[in-house]
Image (spheres, grey):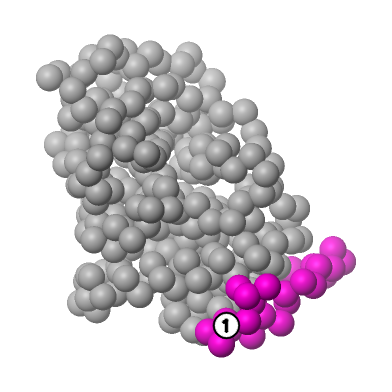
Amino acid sequence: VDAFESDDLPAVLADQVDQDVDSDVQWDDEALLGAMGPALSARHAEDTCIEALVLGHLPVSTSGWPVQHAAARASSLGQSVAFVSLKNGRATAQLILPHQDRSKLVHAPDSRPMAAMLRWRASRARHWVLCVEHAEEAWLSEASDLDAVTVLTGAGDPAVVDCYRTLKAIEHDLEVTLGDDDALPSLGVSIVGAPRHRTAGAAARLTTACRDFLEVETLDVSSIPHMQRVRAVDVGGYDFHDPAPLLIALVRDALASTPADVLNDSPNAQPTD
């Protein structure tokens, strides 16, 4: 396969191509697979985080994994997460509740202008996961409001190689755009749809390659072995044909203009226009 014949592929990745991971190998899971949540850096405010989710080489049921990532993030944080998908000129949003939250699902307010809806979501979720389609990835380097970028990937060899190359491109673009003087968004990997021993093997290879070749000392690595039921509120959708950085900036403005103490307000409170 051409993808494995490039000279820019670290040996730690290339040497494993087409080799299965021995299930008897004892991986240091705790060191490799961190718990989702607070480890992500907050570049703008300690109580908020905007995380861009980039789709890599995924196993079956590709469309379901991004929401699963948001749900895992919510459960790790113990609080709701706002999930927004930007695809084909349409921004759709959900409020994802953590698994341990057994309260009654709230109802999103009636259709309102996009800015008002963003503020309503910001009042109930301080961590946002924005999933962008492949065509939007190049815009991420221009999104100075991002706190983190996570690549969603499978654990197979083609997926690991593709994930590394995606991380390399993102890291390069962020450095060129933001410069060495600015704190860059943290980089992460969420490995999905694989048993733990295969996930740990993929995590080890990616962590080593990113540390040795990209000088990324801390790679936020987490895993989602299988899909689970997601507790979510559909918030609605809007036509949005602008580049992803503009949506990210709108989310940052909504978070900045919505005090965290409104998180305890009535869940059915309506946003103002």
Q: Quadrant of residue 82?
A: top left
Q: Residue 187's x, y, as percent?
A: 42, 64
Q: Is residue 11 magenta?
A: yes
From what the image shows, is residue 49 above or below residue 257?
Answer: below
Q: What secondary structure do most residues of the magenta stretch adopt?
A: loop
State whether residue 133 is above or below residue 162. Answer: above
Q: Is residue 83 left or right of residue 243?
A: right
- Visible residue check, residue 33: yes
Question: Residue at position x 29%, y 63% from top?
Answer: 141
Q: Residue at x 27, y 20 (%)?
A: 265
Q: Is residue 273 above or below residue 74?
A: above
Report the residue marked by disc 1.
6
Q: Amino acid at mark 1?
A: Ser
Determine if the magenta segment contains residue 4.
yes
Callout 1 secondary element: loop
The part of the chain drawn in magenta is 1-29
| Residue under the image location 61 percent in, 51 percent down | 58
Q: x and y percent of residue 156 in the render?
A: 70, 62
Report whether 215 appears left or right of 152. Answer: left
Between 113 and 269, the one lying in front of the other is 113
Quadrant hosting residue 155: bottom right
Nearer to us in this view, 141 or 37: 141
Specify the quadrant that holds the N terminus: bottom right
Image quadrant occupied by the C terminus: top left
Task: Please give the name of the residue rendered at 33% of the width and 61% of the height, measured from the top-left corner.
Answer: 138
Bin the neighbour count of mark 1 within 10 Å (Cα to Cα): few under 14, some 14-19, many 20 and up: few
Residue 223 appearing in the image: no
Q: Quadrant of residue 88?
A: top left
Question: In the image, is 183 to the left or to the right of 98?
Answer: left
Q: Residue 164: percent from the left, percent from the top?
A: 53, 70
Of residues 111 and 48, the one drawn nearer to the viewer in this rendering = 111
| Residue extending furthest toward the right | 24
